[in-house]
Amino acid sequence: MDHFTPLTAGLGGVLIGLSATLLWLVNGRTAGISSIFGGIVPVHRGEVPWRLLFLLGLPIGAWLGAEYGPAIFAEIPTALPSVDIGPAALVGAGLLVGIGTRISRGCTSGHGICGLSRLSKRSFVAVGTFMATAALTVFVMRHVI
Amino acid sequence: MRRPFAYLGAALAAGIVFGLGLALSRMTDPQKIKDFLDFAAIPTGGWDPSLAFVMGGGVLVAFVGLRLHRLFRRPLAADAFQHGGRTELDVPLVAGAAIFGVGWGLAGFCPGPAIAALSLIPDQVWLFVAAMVAGSWIAGEVMERGGSGAVPVGLRTADAAAE
């Protein structure tokens, strides 16, 4: 199981938890990605700039991690991630993720990290549900088709 | 917002730290996500439990962090702590989460990692992000009009009462 990376996984999780804490204590907001981009349209005055800045920070932080991470942690490979499905499937999956997170009001960050931390009953149900359908989808893709 | 500079600065900083956490834990790699979701690989030793450690680390810190507001009257740069505070378990919650899970399993991307990966593999992931934003917008519009049955029951009652 050489691809199991507990050290960087735990560290990354801690950083995500710190990010959620920062946004909560300074701005009074929940770090739920789907809600942050979902709240940009329709445009409410004062609601757009902080959302755009947070979302802009994601690729900046990811770039920093990919650029300097491999030199610090042996667990992190220098190779960039790759996508294994075609453009049409990517669009279909993106639509499902956008629609689903909007209807259930949260994704892996809002329901996952923040909701579970708040011991929200809704979030426990959401996480159990999306974990189950995601696992089922991967099972079908990898072992059935 | 009481302190615009701190408010916007904290939003950007939180985004950067979040993205850094995603990249270091390699949640930006769809193969790694799928290796976690592939529970059928447990007996053969091919399963990657890393994602559980990311969630665990995040929840441990946030469990404390999201309770620290008790120490403050209000956020450091804003007027109030804003939180939905919903408690009802309804059909949209389960149906939406189920739909999200299928898309997540298919691509190996959920919203945060997909947006973060825009700086790593933009030529592929932009399609996913564009579709995701469109899907969210469409679902929001449909729910707003209440025509889909996707509006939470409690809200619909409140709307009816208000009319």
Image (cartoon, rainbow, N blue to C red):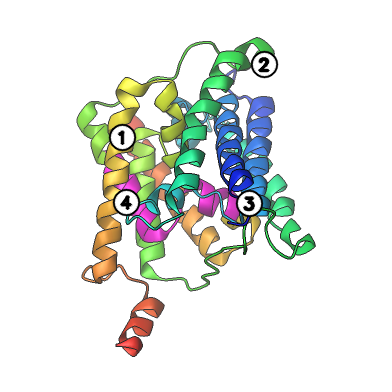
Q: Secondary structure at mark 2?
A: loop
Q: Secondary structure at mark 3?
A: loop
Give me the chain letter of mark 3: B
Dot 4 amino acid type: Ser
Q: Secondary structure at mark 4?
A: helix
Mark 1 or mark 3, which has the lower sequence index? 3
Q: Which residue is mark 4?
A: B136
Q: Is residue B98 visible?
A: no
Which label belongs to residue A73? Answer: 2
Please state the horizontal and vertical placement of residue B161, each as a whole percent of the image.
Answer: 35, 89
Q: Residue at x 33, y 48 (%)?
A: A98
Give me the chain letter of mark 1: B
Q: Which residue is mark 3?
A: B3
Please state the horizontal and vertical placement of residue A13, each as a whole percent of the image.
Answer: 64, 37
Q: Are marks 4 and 2 on the same chain?
A: no
Mark 4 or mark 3, which has the lower sequence index? 3
Give me the chain letter of mark 2: A
Please state the horizontal and vertical placement of residue A39, each as a whole percent of the image.
Answer: 40, 54
Dot 3 amino acid type: Arg
Would you call the spot at circle 4 few (<14 residues within 10 Å), some (14-19), or many (20 or more)?
many
> Are the residues flagged by discs 1 and 4 in contact, CB closer than 8 Å?
no
Q: Which residue is mark 1?
A: B128
